[in-house]
Image: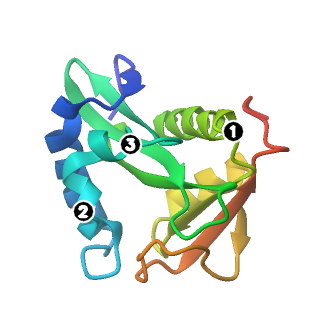
Amino acid sequence: MPMHRLPQLRPIAPSDDPQMAAIIRAVMPEFGAGGPGFAIHDPEVDFMSRAYAAPRCHYLVLDLDGRVLGGGGVAPLEGGDGETAELRKMYFLPEARGHGLGELVARAVLDKAREFGFRRCYLETLTGMDAAQRLYARLGFVRRKSALGNTGHGGCDRWYELDLATWSTTKP
């Protein structure tokens, strides 16, 4: 479905929390990620604006006339080394996919991670999220053989890492 207007990219606000929680709860099961060990059960899902108000955290939403279409963020990797950010909670409604909006969000939050002084960015995903994995490869993420940190997402089976020191914020 073509988008006639581009949504606004902006930081998450408390009023966005219910919409973003609904998106996460709708999208994750679509990819078989509704059970234990997935981000759908993270306590922050209902209070995203509060979770990403913490130091070195940043979350952006796509807003089309007050309707949130998705979003994504970065935060310090739980159980990490302090130099590694995690790309987190990047989910979009079906109508927002395939328009380059995921890349727009990812580039903006990765740029913010670098501003925060992170040297690396890590992410977890799963088999079946093929379009997301193609995006991560385009952005320069390299697949890892094992998980990092202590995210609690034991259901994920794909792990990626990006060197923020050499990453380019501009498209290749």
Point out residue 86 in the picture as x, y percentages from the top left corner.
55, 56
Q: Which residue is mark 3?
A: 52
Three-letter amino acid code at the position of disc 3: Tyr
Q: Is residue 86 left or right of residue 116?
A: left
Q: Earlier in the sequence, mark 3 or mark 2?
A: 2
Q: Is residue 128 left or right of residue 109?
A: left
Count neighbours of disc 1 (C-alpha within 10 A) and say few if under 14, some if 14 to 19, many if 20 or more.
Answer: many
CB of mark 1 within 8 Å of CB of mark 2? no
Specify the quadrant that holds the C terminus: top right
Q: Is residue 123 visible?
A: yes
Q: Which residue is mark 2?
A: 43
Residue 114: mark in rendering: 1
Three-letter amino acid code at the position of disc 1: Arg
Q: CA distance from mark 1 to mark 3?
A: 16 Å
Point out residue 29 in the picture as x, y percentages from the top left corner.
25, 69
Point out residue 141 in the picture as x, y percentages from the top left corner.
71, 57
Q: Earlier in the sequence, mark 1 or mark 3?
A: 3
